[in-house]
Image (spheres, grey):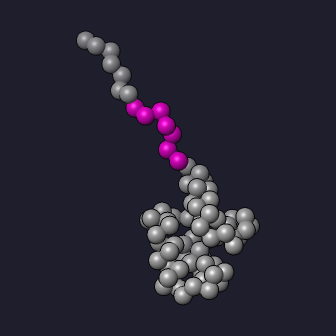
C-alpha cells in the first residue's frame, strides 16, 4: 500500500472582505471620481449604479451595463 496524500491547493479561498476590497479597487481604477470614503460606503450593485449616474452623468442603463461588465456577476 502506498501512503499517497492528495495534493490539494494550498491557496486559501478569498474571504468576502478580500473579495470586496478587490472589487472596490477595480471600481476606483475605472471610476477615478470615487474617493476612498465613497467606495467604502457603497451598499451593493444598485448603489454603485446610482453613484456612477450621479458622478459621471451617465444614463442609468449605460451605468448599469458598465457596472455589470466590471462586476462580472460578483457582489459588492
Give the image quarter of residue 55.
Answer: bottom right
Front-most of residues 69 and 45: 69
Does the rendering let one see residue 41? no
How many numbered circles does the render carry? 0
Does 53 sit left or right of 67 as displayed?
A: right
Relative image position of residue 65 (x, y in whole percent): 47, 77
Which quadrant: the C terminus? bottom right
**Is residue 74 visible to the viewer in this orientation of the structure?**
yes
Residue 49 covered by magenta stretch:
no
Above or below residue 19? Residue 75 is: below
- Name the spot of residue 10 as percent of width and height, x first: 47, 33
Q: Residue at x 64, y 65 (%)?
A: 28
Please report the bounds of the magenta region as a residue range. 8-14
Q: Is residue 41 above or below residue 10?
A: below
Q: Main secondary structure of the magenta part?
A: loop
The quarter of the picture where residue 46 lies is: bottom right
Please tell me which residue is depicted at 50% across the width and 82% down the height of the picture.
62
Farthest left residue in view: 1
Q: Position of residue 11 (x, y in %)?
A: 49, 37
Residue 16 sits in quarter: bottom right
Q: Position of residue 60 (x, y in %)?
A: 53, 86
23 lies left or right of 33: left
* Residue 12 forms part of the magenta stretch: yes
Residue occupying the point 62% across, 63% down: 29
Quadrant housing the N terminus: top left
Amino acid at each position: 500500500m502506498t501512503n499517497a496524500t492528495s495534493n490539494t491547493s494550498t491557496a486559501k479561498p478569498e474571504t468576502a472582505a478580500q473579495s470586496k476590497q478587490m472589487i472596490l479597487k477595480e471600481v476606483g481604477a475605472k471610476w477615478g471620481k470615487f474617493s476612498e470614503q465613497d467606495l467604502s460606503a457603497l451598499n451593493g450593485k444598485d448603489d454603485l449604479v446610482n453613484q456612477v449616474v450621479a458622478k459621471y452623468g451617465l444614463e442609468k442603463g449605460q451605468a448599469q451595463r458598465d457596472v455589470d461588465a466590471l462586476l462580472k456577476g460578483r457582489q459588492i
